[in-house]
Image (cartoon, helix red, strand yellow):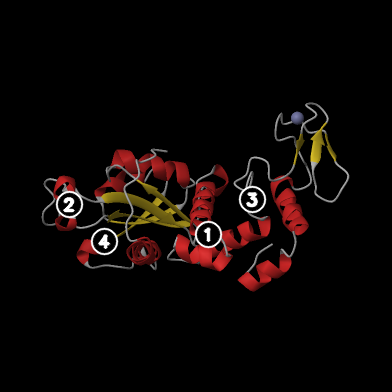
Amino acid sequence: MEFTTLAQLTEHFSDKQTCIDYLTNLRWAGNVTCTFCGNEKVYELKGATKRFKCAKCRKQFSAIKGTIFENSPISLQTWFIAVYILTAHKKGISSVQLATDLGVTQKTAWFMAHRIRFALKTKSFETQLDGVIQADETFMGGKNKNRHADKKVPQSQGLSVNDKTPFWGMVDNDGEVRTQVIPNTQAKTIKPIIQKMVKEGSILVTDEWQAYCQLRKNYLHIVINHKEGKYVANGFTTNRIEGFWSILKRGVYGIYHQVSAAPAPLL
Ligand SMILES: [Zn+2]
């Protein structure tokens, strides 16, 4: 089921039961298994709330068990609206704005946004990309001259990126994006990320950065030589991933104002 407007979504999820049924179907597609022991024999409990009881461990559960919605006083309807808003706003949304839209406190909105972002880091959102993949690195971070004396980064004058945080990003033709904070842009850092996240045999479109050279074995590698002023090669470009970076940066600049460099999760 796909929703293209917020109105459609709120109309569909008009009550708690519809939300639970949706989650139940999304999670198990008819084959409910116990969330405690994995047993496949479960009974649906009487009543309208789609609760189940395991035939083996005898514990009760519902589709909410183990999800970001568990143990929350916020209604599922409000959660679903939050997921929609957070994923539909390209440049992000502040917790203050989200709080206003949902009718909850800023503290609650902040907490919800964090849970939803946490969910986006889980495995089901990390399927391999395939087809034509545009890949690129970028650097984010403020200017050294604006930093407090005790936070200034040494040797970061001129074109240096010592004081910035490198990011790696990839996008496929459907607009599916994968990004990651990386410790550096060396081949030994980037190569395993590509191998993990891009299906072998895909077409990989990058700029001329030398760290990409070793990828020819597993991918059809198209290089767009930006240094030579080229932006298209045989119809391929890296415009989409660059557009993504620019939207991300506008979000950081205009919505979040300040982000800190998270420790890089290497795979
Ligand atoms: Zn069980």
Q: CA distance from mark 3 to mark 2?
A: 41 Å
Q: Tell me which numbered mark, 3 or 1, is placed earlier along the sequence.
A: 3
Label 4: how many residues lie within 10 Å, few (<14), some (14-19) or many (20+)?
A: some
Q: Is residue 80 above or below residue 122?
A: below
Regarding residue 9, the answer to whether it shows in the image is yes
Image quarter of residue 241: bottom left
Label 1: how many residues lie within 10 Å, few (<14), some (14-19) or many (20+)?
A: some
Residue nearest the observer in this picture, 11 or 110: 110
Q: Tell me which numbered mark, 2 or 4, is placed earlier along the sequence.
A: 2
- Name the residue rendered at 77%, 41% in the picture: 32
Residue nearest the observer in this picture, 124 or 48: 48
Labels 4, 3: front one: 3
Label 3: how many residues lie within 10 Å, few (<14), some (14-19) or many (20+)?
A: few
From the image, tell me which residue sits under label 3: 73
Is 197 on the left or on the right of 205, as rendered? right
- Which image quarter is the C terminus in? top left
Amino acid carrying label 2: it is His
Query: CB of mark 4 within 8 Å of CB of mark 1?
Result: no
From the image, tell me which residue sits under label 2: 148
